[in-house]
Image (cartoon, rainbow, N blue to C red):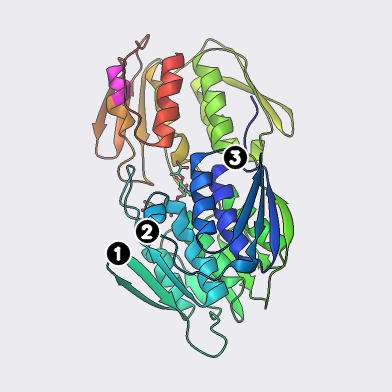
Amino acid sequence: MKVSGAKNSALVVMAGALLCKSECRLRNIPGLVDVDKMCQIIEALGVKIQRNDDVLDFDMTGFNCHTPPFELVSKLRAAFFAIGPILARLGVAKVPLPGGCSIGARPVELHVRGLQAMGAHVEIAHGIVNAYVTGVNKRLQGAKIYLDYPSVGATETLMMAATLADGETILENAAKEPEVVDLANFCISIGAKITGAGTDRIVIVGVQELHATEYSIISDRVEAATFLVAGAITNSEITVFPAISSHLAAAVAKLEQIGARIAIDSPDRMRTIPTGILRGTDIETLPYPAFPTDMQAQFMALLAVSEGSSVITETVFENRLQHVAELKRMGANIKVKGNHAIVEGVLALSGATVTATDLRASAALVIAGLA
Ligand code: EPU
């Protein structure tokens, strides 16, 4: 199976493209509705975008609008992360609050507090976050920011904002997800000075201006791991490529505990080896490098047909167990207590009409359908 470019890298790197003054070319962009929506949002700011298969060409020379439209931002949470580059480039940004979604309330106070620490004035009224910088140059100021939680989006917003700030910004307790590192590498390719991405302490030294680049997005670890789970549940050999095996360590370790075997054939090629064994195990979702929340639903489908009991604990999002009810329609034996799902493996699932709630829940139901 060919693995696409990482959705969560692509969306935020597209927002990061707003930091460049001139042009920028992004490669390995996945073909997703969310990418189309992000293109529309960036175009609404005055940017020209040309799409050719998995390549996006941006021309930033007309970027002059600081107000992405409500109808578009409300449909795509990642669009809120553009507040960082818009504010850094234009000194003002009016971005609608992203609102909740099917997996949780998803507040943005960590983004807002970080921008305030960098000298931005932020007022939230009528559902709009109105942020602006005063002073002659309208530039944000470097700051030392401790994130109460290693939020992926807040780390990304603040890292982008800091690339064009006056002085040094230090993000403590930063998110370590590969998509944060990918964004940092993109920013470095346009001339930003960033060290420590991938650790919990990221240091950004602001520069005056960021230049053109051509950058390729990393491959999607969640898509790769989803295919590996599909291989395990169908007891078949599935090769996934390109896959960065180090990004999949937690998911592969769980697959092996469950009884699957995963071969790493080359640095970017992984394969499931049928073993006929599926046994229960416990899973707790946590920030990277621990087990990802974006793989929780797919593993629940697998554990639903694994021998014995498993406990799945979701700690990242407060409402990400909606697929339980749908898997139960297919004959799974699962009970929910708070943020725990107790799964008793059954011998087989049966086909049923089900409702897909969010992206990963949908993938889980497809996987269950395959079984
Ligand atoms: N949080 C706050 N306050 C904030 C920011 C976050 O309380 O200011 C909370 C959230 O409500 C949540 C937790 O912190 O409970 C984690 O949120 P985080 O900010 O880390 O997530 P995100 O940036 O909104 C990204 C991905 C998600 C992925 C999470 C966790 C993008 C566009 N989205 O979301 O991807 O689950 O990180 O790894 O990058 C998906 O792809 O299906 C998906 C939901």
Report the residue at 51% width, 67% height from top.
84
**Earlier-in-chain disc, 1 versus 3:** 3
Question: 356 or 316: which is nearer to us?
Answer: 356
Considering the numbered disc 1 on the image, is that residue within a helix, a strand or a loop? loop
At which x and y percent is residue 339? Answer: 29, 40
Q: Which residues are magenta?
A: 326-330
| Image quarter of the N terminus | top right
Residue 301 vertical position relative to residue 158 in the rendered view, above or below: above
Instruction: Report if the CB atoms under discs 1 and 3 are less than 8 Å apart.
Output: no
Q: Residues within 10 Å of mark 1 (few under 14, many from 20)?
A: few
Q: In the image, which disc is placed on residue 30?
A: 3
At which x and y percent is residue 298? Answer: 44, 28
Q: What is the C-alpha distance between the residues marked 1 and 3?
A: 31 Å
Considering the numbered disc 2 on the image, is that residue within a helix, a strand or a loop? helix
Report the residue at 55% width, 43% height from top.
7
Asked if residue 289 lies left or right of residue 354, the reply is: right
Give the number of callouts: 3
Please identify, in this view, whether the residue under mark 2 or under mark 3 is nearer the observer.
Answer: 2
**Earlier-in-chain disc, 2 versus 3:** 3
| Residue that carries the numbered disc 2 in the rendered image | 70
**370 falls in the magenta region:** no
| Residue that carries the numbered disc 1 in the rendered image | 127
Residue type pointed to by label 1: Gly
Asked if residue 110 lies left or right of residue 143, the reply is: left
Report the residue at 30% width, 33% height from top.
322
Question: 83 or 239: which is nearer to us?
Answer: 83
